[in-house]
Amino acid sequence: MATNTEATVETAVATDNVPSPAKLAALPDDIPPQLELPMLPADVSAEWLSKVLERKVKTVALDRTIPGTATKVFVTVTYEDDKPPKEAPTRLCVKGGFDPNLLKMMPWIVMIYQRECDFYNHIALTLDNMELPKCWWAGHNSTQGIVAMDDLSAQGCDYGNPVEAWPVSRVIAGAEQLAALHAKTWHVQASDYPWLTSDYDQVILTLMNTYDAVVKGPDRPKIHDHLKDQGRVTSVLKRHYASRNPRFRCLLHGDSHSGNTYLVNDAPRFLDWQMIHIGSAFHDLSYFVGAALTIEDRRAKEWDIVEHYLRTLEKFGVEPLSVADEEVAIEYKKSFLAGIGWIMCPYEMQAKECVHPMALRYAAALDDHKVLDLVEALPEEPL
């Protein structure tokens, strides 16, 4: 599914603040040199799948495609052997850059596809306490990146809908999944993932150039007046990015709102790993809590959820942390600034029906915690 943050990346192409071709070329290919990657849905053939699945595929039926920043191609597979090995998928989602017009217009966007491939190839298998979609194959070259995973719909899974608020119990379960990711990568350094570029901050700051025009436009969510100030919000974002607390540094999902989840027996799992980057753990947690709960439930239960998240981190090996720690509280509160992306999201990127509830939830959290005042009062140097 195309997400808000993915869409913000598309807009950033109009600026100079996008990865250069040289930067993209520096990323290593992640496939055997003799294996070509399909560039169109029709290219997802029996011959190609036979190579990547290492099983003789007889037929491939194209069921449907879902366009987006990355196109999802859903196929049904049969095998030459009518009784294929037990671990052979029959319903697949093949995700990648299958829109030639988009690739021509924004050749740098392949970085997003490459990033998700690298997540599944180099990180996912290490996350032993986190549940992820079954990935059958992932690989990229300089012009394409493809992930072949289970078709979750065929397995009866539901998908998170940003319009719907979740019960507290489900949000707690989602926080446990984030804790599993964060604990496994706690205090990670950029040198640990040399292939992982860090472009998130600049993309958001670039989009702030149109903040006033969007939030003051017609039929927008009714947000607080102090949030309708492009200059002030931009300044606060810059200060927030400069003051992330290194105590909480880890690998982030990066776009952890409820719309990027699927549900297994009502338990949330995270999808869409194109926006992974290194940052503060509370970016993921605050962004998730702010999206998934009603305003009333967040106000009543958010600190219980944070405490449960911290105890889950500790269970997975992180040093004990507490909501009574002022640095924990500050980092949690100011990380609601991740929701600015929804507050300034044009309806061309996300449907109004999604933007309104999400923007209102994040605006309420920013106001409840007086986040702009909080960040402006921080010292110039990182905590």
Image (cartoon, rainbow, N blue to C red):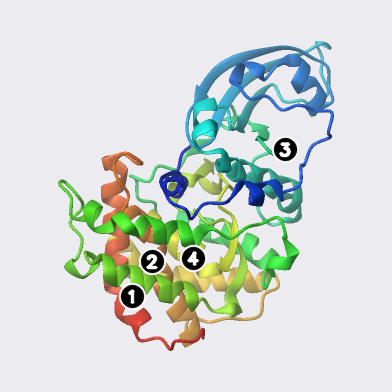
**Badge 1: residue crowd in 10 Å (few <14, some 14–19, many ≥20):** many
Identify the residue position indicated by label 4 in the image. Answer: 283
Is 120 rendered above or below residue 68? below
Q: Nearer the viewer, mark 4 or mark 3?
A: 3
As drawn, the label of residue 303 is none
Q: Residue at x 29, y 41 (%)?
A: 347
Q: Report the front residue among 345 and 194.
A: 194
Identify the residue position indicated by label 3 in the image. Answer: 141
Label 3 vs 2, first from the N-terminus: 3
Q: Amino acid at mark 2?
A: Leu
Q: Nearer the viewer, mark 1 or mark 3?
A: 3
Q: Residue at x 28, y 57 (%)?
A: 211
Tag 1 near tag 3, CB within 8 Å = no
- Along the horizontal axis of the image, is 336 left or right of 281? left
Identify the residue position indicated by label 2 in the image. Answer: 337
Label 4 vs 2, first from the N-terminus: 4
Tag 1 near tag 4, CB within 8 Å = no
SS of the residue under disc 2: helix
Is 107 rendered above or below residue 187? above
Mark 4–mark 3 distance (CA, rounded to whole Å) = 30 Å
Tag 1 near tag 2, CB within 8 Å = yes
Expressed as whole percent of the image width and height from the top left, the position of residue 286 reads 44, 65
Q: Amino acid at mark 3?
A: Asn
Mark 1–mark 2 distance (CA, rounded to whole Å) = 8 Å
Identify the residue position indicated by label 1 in the image. Answer: 371
